Image (spheres, grey):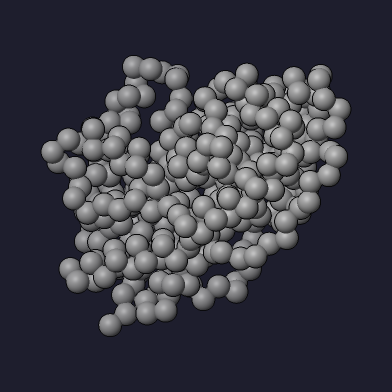
Amino acid sequence: MKKKILLFQQDFKFLIKFRKDLLYYLSKNNDIITLSLSSNKIKKDYNFKNVIIKKSSFILINHFLLTINFIFIILKYKPDIVFSFNTVPSIISNFFKFFFNYNLCTTMTGLGNIFITTKMKYIIPKIKYLIVRLINANSNWLIFQNPDDKRYFKTICKYKFNKNTLITPGSGIKILKKNHKITNDVITFGMLSRIISGKGINEFLEAAKLIKLKYSNINFILAGPLNDNSFNLNSQHFINKCKLSGVNYLGNLDDVEYFFNEIDIFVLPSYREGTPRSVLEAMLYKKPIITTKAIGCRETVINNYNGIKVKIKNVGELVNAIIFFVNNKNLISQYGNNSYKYLIKKFDLKIVLNQYSKVLSHLNAK
């Protein structure tokens, strides 16, 4: 018998980018509904019932609209199972489980900016505590993308920690053969991410500026969406800073293949992640990785095998990692091939789908 399944993710673009294969996998034997926000019109060529809300420039309005539409879907379609992704959908779906009857699988794709901010140090810890306790209490299944987030939940919830948990290697990635750029005399370092400070944008720009003072045969490129909100860098200041740092900002790219074909080494000096999708994509294109020892990032790199890990917010270590590849061009191809091997071993999409299949079988049996 077919089940009605709701997939609830904050942004439709990321739902399709990160969960498309999961959507199609679940839709083979189930009726799928999705709920998310979008800034753009959506082509109606997906075989799902998509509830798309026009994204507002005001965060609280977006949260309100997601909440109202979630209640509407629960009342109208009565889904048997809800899969929630990201912090806000997870809070909403877990809270309303007090009032409605559905099985809930919460995937913590990363604990978000609220878990890395140093502002309001007396209030934020209490908010974190309430979020974790709520999600742990009401989820039938909890899926984490790295072991550190699971340990964080377990520390807060202690003996009441949810027994039904899994750790997946991020959203996984379909293993395909991609063209591999041959390094020439000019080495290009690239970063692809949302333009927010928590991704290590400032450190990347500062490192590029320092490297450019010493080396002339090095290029730096950066790509990703730039939007103004409370967590983002100021737009005009950021664009000017890119120019002063000698970084070529490409804007938001729909086609990441162009980006990865332009670079030799991928850089992500993030402060915290679930499992960074951009790093997995870089590994698919056989790129060496420079990232941080942050939660979620450190699992993607084996030091001196497929890349280098540096301390969070440490520009000096980031500069040294970049210089390492400048002085060891012969290792770029070797590290890149190792990235691809490590990707196949640990982050293959098939691993993730098998894990979600296990969860679905358990929930269907309830």
Q: Is residue 56 above or below residue 254?
A: above
Q: Residue at x 31, y 75 (%)?
A: 3
* Residue 18 on image: x %, y %: 52, 57
* Residue 130 on image: x %, y %: 27, 33
From this viewpoint, is residue 148 visible? yes
Front residue of 4 and 61: 4
Front residue of 364 and 203: 203
Q: Tell me the quadrant of the picture where the N terminus can be found.
A: bottom left
Q: Residue at x 74, y 45 (%)?
A: 263
Locate residue 69 relative to residue 82 in the image: left or right: right
Locate residue 55 relative to residue 84 in the image: left or right: right
Number of marks drawn: 0
Residue extending farthest to the left is 159
Q: Tell me the quadrant of the picture where the C terminus can be found.
A: bottom left
* Residue 45 on image: x %, y %: 60, 74
Residue extending farthest to the bottom is 1
Q: Residue at x 44, y 28 (%)?
A: 116
